[in-house]
Each structure stands twice: as structure tokens, then as C-alpha cells.
Image (spheres, rainbow, N blue to C red):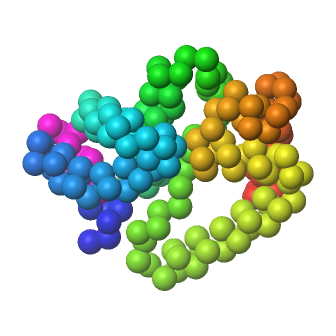
Amino acid sequence: MTDAVLLARLLAETAAGDVRAFRQLYDASSAHLFGVLLRILERRDWAEEALQDCYLRVWQKAETYAPDKGAPLTWLQTIARYRALDLLRARRPEVGMPDEEDAPPLTFADGDAVDPEARAVEHEGLGQLAGCMEALAPEQRRSVLLAYYEGYTHAELARVLKAPLGTVKSWVRRGLLLLRECLEA
């Protein structure tokens, strides 16, 4: 059984209220999610708090996971990312958060797939993404990478890039639009 199939089954069982399945889900995914949270928050104590919040949310919302819309690890990582950003906003209220309409859902390639064909398709997609990233203007590329890989908010990007907030928002938005167009071509 692949990790994705196992995680999907554990999420379904968790949605039905199975505490043992929830524990297995935690054991199977918490180390990975903690790494994501630690990278975004850069503080162990905040990452631990966000991880706890993340799994509370998973327990409460497991029935909303839709296997046809993405891999289970992608869904879990998205919850973790939003928990981290919520914690940043609560701890540092001066940091503005991206508007929901400006922030498309974060998706990750499922690195746990063992199917060689799936790996080849994933590798091709990553190569295409890298090519599309290279086509972006340097400020757009850096803004998108910092926002979606490092978890920077728009206000943090403005500070780091020494640019006005509106300009940074435009770089991210236009960069994402250009990426979408490039990837769809």
C-alpha cells in the first residue's frame, strides 16, 4: 500500500471518529508537517504549537478531505501552512496576511509515489515548472519563491525586497498568473 493510499484511508477513518486511525495518521505525517512548520515559523516552540493546532483541525475537518482534489499529504500540508500563517498573524499583528483571492491553494508534489510512470510525469512537471520560473522577471521569481516556499507574507516580502507593499503584491500576483499561463501552454 502506498503512503498516499494509507494516508487517504487513515483520513477517512479519522473522519468516522476512529481515534486509533487518527493516531496512526499523526505518526505517519507529523514529522513531515513539523518540518514544514519549522521552515515557515523558524521557531521550534511556535512550530510545535502550530502542529498541535493543525492536528486539531484535521480531527475536526477530516471529512472535508476530497481524494479527487489532491493527495492527502497535500491537504495536510495546506492545513499546516495556514495554521503557521495564522500563528504568525496572531503573534505579530503588524504583519499583514495575503488576501484569500490573491493566494491560490498551495500544492505540493506527492514525493511518496512509488509508481515509476507517476515519478516520470512528476519529474517532467517539475522540469516544466523550473523552466517557467526562469521565464519570470527576477523580482517576480523571488517574490513567488519567498511567498510560497518560505511562507513570507506580503508585508514581509515588502520589507525584505525593500519595495512598496502594492508592488510586491503585484509581483506575486503577476508571477503566479504567468506561471499558470506557462504551465497550461
- Relative to residue 13, is residue 43 drawn left or right? right
| 174 versus 25 height, above or below | above
Q: Nearer the viewer, residue 101 or 135?
A: 135
Q: At which x and y percent is residue 75? A: 43, 46
In depth, the one of 52 and 24 nearer the eye is 52
Q: Residue at x 50, y 28 (%)?
A: 88
Residues shaded magenta = 7-17
Front-most of 36 and 106?
A: 36
Q: Quadrant of residue 125?
A: bottom right
Q: Residue at x 68, y 46 (%)?
A: 146
- Which image quadrant for residue 174? top right
Q: Residue at x 17, y 39 (%)?
A: 16
From where the camera sits, is residue 61 visible? no
Looking at the picture, how far across and down is residue 128, in whole percent?
74, 67
- Residue drawn at x 26%, y 58% as measured from the top left: 28
Residue 174 shows in this picture: yes
> Considering only vertical position in the picture, is 58 above or below 183?
above
Left or right of 169, for residue 43: left
Q: Horizontal and vertical percent for residue 180?
A: 76, 50
For the N terminus, give its image quadrant. Answer: bottom left
**Overall secondary structure of the magenta stretch?**
helix
Residue 19 on image: x %, y %: 11, 42
Quick one: which residue is furthest to the bottom in this view? 116
- In the image, taking residue 159 as reference, residue 86 lies left or right, namely left
**How many numbered marks, from 0 up?**
0
Question: Magenta stretch: residue 8 in it?
Answer: yes
Instruction: Name the quarter where the C terminus is drawn.
Output: bottom right
Q: Was residue 44 drawn as part of the magenta stretch in this picture?
A: no
